[in-house]
Image: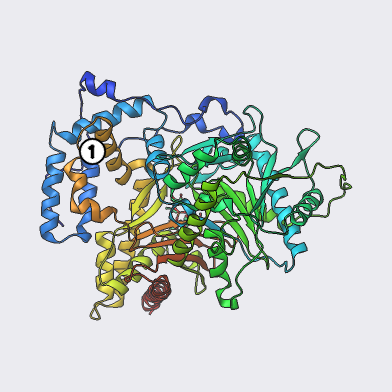
Amino acid sequence: MFSTAIGLSRQVVKYTMSNTMKQAIKPTACLMPLKAKTGRMFIHQRHLPKLPVPPLQQTLYRYLLSVKPLLSDFDFDTTKKLVDDFGRPGGIGEKLQMGLIERSKKLDNWLSQWWLDHAYLNFREPVIIHSSPAVIFPQQSYTDLDGQLKFAASVVAGILDFKVMVDNQSLPVDKLGGSPLCMYQYYKILSSCRIPGSRKDSIVTHPADGPDPPKHIVVAHNYKFFSLEVYKDGWTPLTRSEIYQQLCDIVNRSQETSAPVGILTAENRNTWGKIYNQMNKDRTNRAIFSEIQRSIFVLCLDEKISSLPKEEFDNEVGRQLLHGGGSELNSGNRWADKTLQFIVGPNGACGLQYEHAPAEGPPIATLLDHTLTYCDNVCEDVAPVDNQLTPAKRLKFNLIPDVKEAIENAKISIDSMIEDLELQIFKFKLFGKDFVKANKLSPDGFIQVALQLAYFKIYGESCATYESASLRRYQLGRTDTIRSCSTDSDLFLRAMADSDKSNSELVRLMRQAVESHKEYTNMAVFGDGIDRHLLGLKLMAIEWGWNVPDLMMDTAYNISTHFKLSTSQVPAKTDSTLTFGPVVPDGFGVCYNPKSKHINFAVSAFNSSPSTSSMTLSLKLTESLAEMQNILVQGSMSAKL
Ligand code: COA
């Protein structure tokens, strides 16, 4: 263990602030009208604590701990000097900390707007693969177009059923470890849309209690878009049979493909932003954009899927949901700016894609659990079908010449992006979270340590690892980072590579690594994570027009935030799997849904990186989980002898 001049004291430092600094902290607009929400769903909202600003010395100390396994002794000493300098009394760190504390007094959440801008709206890479996750539903039993449309109709009815709970604010409050969570993300997942800008994007939401609430969804088929009213006589939702009838009509009216305008939404954001602004000058296009943005969600009825052997089916569905499979397949049958797109393909292949800016995976998983349960339990409609329903409105874009060229460019871009992505969707069947719990360990920590082991088996070293931790215990909370690579995980990995280590020693080190991960998790979910705090200090400096502090320009900061393993647990009651792309060119995206007796995994990597293969990581992960199980089983057997 290294020594440090920085103590772990939680003592509050008394700060004074210059007037210039005070003026520089401009409160950003509150993200949403907190006071307006008083239903059951928001009953705890006002009582949720505000996200704290962690003590500066605590973060700096923990930052040093976290970079230790990633650095040489020499680099570590350099970083330690920078940390000491940043944190010295009266230094830059204290001044920035004071700025954050002032900001936290003025805003419901000092981080939310910054995070929304930094992580999403200022992000200029395409949202497809680089930001928007997909959720693969369990394969459905339908095999023909009729079955596909019937299932799609049930999905629409199921979402509208869920929407009632959001609209009348009766959705049960989510809990984590018994604590109520912030429910505002639910308010943002329906009727929202990202709007591209030439340098920064924005989001619009049209909630049910706002002016002129939307009553329609948008349906995409053969690259054509239709606006479909899903309520009649005021706010009576269409029955499943009525929705089915309307979908049949849409499919009949769109037998031929159109120019795939939707593919533009998969472009780099600056490129799409510029085309969008051009198209928006045309009245027809402007009205269509508004219709899509205001819609409750988009339903994509997919036509084609490449025929593949059965064992490749899950991977292919994952690809279809994540990016549409390319310009010749379904990539043009999407509107990637839309917060929620439900995708219903042939042969029981279905799921959703969501644009990440307004929400994390767990609220989406709740919506899909409700929808799929609804679909499973759906009864035949008793009410007769209303034959006077208004047919869906075709949304036909005006294709000015520049747009045609932009579509051709977008096709090339998405096809090369898709070519670069390697995806493995698999079920680990040897055990699930019950086995880990029975061994008195955290399943999430166990899986994360197995991931560390898998990576170590391939590369012989540990890497910076990101796991999302929910900050929804706090008002408007989003996420912080659990740095899953720790000194304790590194000790365990090295012990695994050492054939002299006894099983009991391996059990001890494994437990220590898993428990250390759980400690970090608790720290992160209780607002004491280090990544958002360091980001906040950096953004404070930028907001004040200061140079980015040396600490954040240091090699250690770059290495420790170059997350070669970007991971997330998204549990769902249904047997679904969430998937997303890697966040660095030479990294992996790993998502998992731990079930009682098995674990669903999705692993992604880029083919352009010669050093990564999602297939290899998946195999090593499977091997690591099995080895760790074996160590525990052997350990408990010898304990009984
Ligand atoms: N012994 C026995 N059981 C244990 C245990 C132990 N030592 N430690 C944990 N468990 C149990 C828990 O009580 C829980 O039980 P339950 O299934 O009955 O609820 C279960 O094991 C799972 O706990 P654990 O594996 O530790 O994970 P968690 O549920 O606390 O989740 C995170 C951990 C990090 C995933 C969660 O805190 C979080 O932040 N989730 C949100 C992540 C997110 O937003 N992702 C989306 C990004 S798009």
Residue 570 visible in image: no
Image position, residue 245 (x, y; %):
81, 52
594 shown above or below 335:
below
Q: Nearer the viewer, residue 458 or 585?
A: 585
Residue that protrudes farthest toward the top in the picture: 19
**Mark 1: few, some, or many residues within 10 Å (few <14, many ≥20)?**
many
Residue 316 visible in image: yes
Residue under the point 29% across and 53% down: 561
593 horizontally vs 4: left or right: right
Q: Nearer the viewer, residue 257 or 344?
A: 257
599 shown above or below 121:
below
481 horizontally vs 491: left or right: right
237 horizontally vs 414: left or right: right
Image position, residue 45 (x, y; %):
51, 32
Q: Which residue is mark 1?
A: 56
Q: Nearer the viewer, residue 370 or 501?
A: 370
- Tell me the amino acid under the disc marked 1: Leu
Image position, residue 1 (x, y; %):
16, 57
Q: Nearer the viewer, residue 493 or 106?
A: 106
Screen quadrant of the C terminus: bottom left
Residue under the point 35% across and 64% down: 449
| Rendering colour mode | rainbow
